[in-house]
Image (cartoon, grey):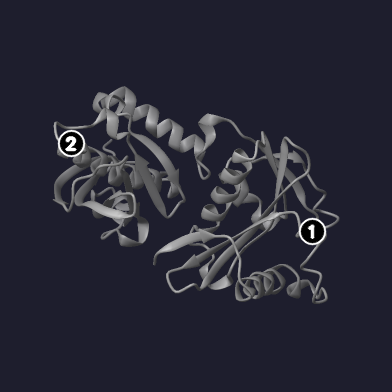
Amino acid sequence: MSLQVITPTTAAHWDQYYALRYQVLRKPFRRPLGSEKDEYDQVAEHRMLVDENDNLIGIGRLHFNSSEEAQIRFMVVAPKYQGEGHGVMVVQALELLARKQGATRVIIRSRDTTLGFYLKCGYEIKEEANTVDNPMAEHQLVKQLHPVNHIVYRPTWCTELQKTWYEHIPVSKAMSIRIYQYTGRSIELRAPLARNINVHGTMFAGSLYTLATLTGWGLLQLQLRERDLEGSIVLAEGKINYRKPVIDDPRAVAYLNEIKGDFSPLLEGKNARLTVTVMVRDGDLAGAEFTGEYVVLAPRD
């Protein structure tokens, strides 16, 4: 499924946008139709996450409380798509918008049911609500925006992983490979063309292979942490198909739902074997496709 974040512009977009907002955030609490809108809608920025068929996946809104503080509200993922990491894409788009417009912090109000998600996105509780007396009370959360915390989901984990690579895999630092984004369901790594260029002015083939290998490795490592599992990851076999010369900064992306194999043997003290597909993109075009067979070595006593 190919997804993109867009700005609602047509009447059909707006109808879908407000219908989803009402369906998830107002109707379950028996609020009247019309309560899904407020006075900030006219001055706010609105975003929709849609698939290749223009089906609505999720929505969110950003408005400014001051020149430094932006607020995310009305974050919704359609019920049938929840639990697939799509909310991270909406938060990412709204945070990027806040940064571009000069915000130094973003605040969010969250009930207990969504609190865990925002904490994983790097938000911290600023004011804790009394949910004992009022289960519907909202916590106020804040995230300080600065250049090094552009990663929306599990930013601490991603920072630690990249530090490990730089310390133990020196070529990753020489190539300036960095984790651009992790959603819990996908990972994207980037590297500057200028640090990995060949005599033809395109991306060096060996750099593409390394970038793709670390992308698959990174997704597996973070998924181990999601599952509270331990193991050492090694590449058993890797194949890459170079589709076109990469002339721009490449983006390497891998998706959890495309992994073949599972982690369950680790629970029995056995090695797990998983195959990860990584697409390296040159802009919107496919530059290379990598298939890596990784083995996760179970800890030995």
Task: Give the side of residue 196 with respect to residue 102, left or right.
Answer: left
**SS state under label 2:** loop
Residues packed near mark 1 inside 10 Å, few (<14), some (14 to 19) or many (20 plus) = few
Task: Give the side of residue 175 with respect to residue 89, left or right.
Answer: left
Q: 195 or 143, which is in the foreground?
A: 195
Residues packed near mark 2 inside 10 Å, few (<14), some (14 to 19) or many (20 plus) = some
Q: Which mark is residue 67?
A: none
How far separated are the C-alphas under marks 1 and 2? 56 Å
For discs 1 and 2, the disc positioned in front in the rendered view: 2
Q: Position of residue 223 (x, y in %)?
A: 39, 48
Q: Earlier in the sequence, mark 1 or mark 2?
A: 1
Q: Position of residue 92 (x, y in %)?
A: 54, 48
Task: Give the side of residue 58 with respect to residue 125, left or right.
Answer: left
Q: How many numbered marks are there? A: 2
Q: Is residue 5 something one can see in this rendering?
A: yes
Q: Residue at x 34, y 42 (%)?
A: 218
**SS state under label 1:** loop
Q: In the rendered image, which residue does mark 1 sit on?
A: 135
Instruction: Relative to 67, say whether 59 is above or below.
Output: below
Instruction: Relative to 278, say whether 160 is above or below.
Output: above
Picture quarter with the C terminus: top left
Q: In the rendered image, which residue does mark 2 sit on?
A: 204
Amino acid residing under circle 1: Pro
Dividing the picture into quadrants, the one containing residue 263 is bottom left
Q: 141 or 34, which is in the foreground?
A: 34
Q: 83 or 49, which is in the foreground?
A: 49
Picture quarter with the N terminus: bottom left
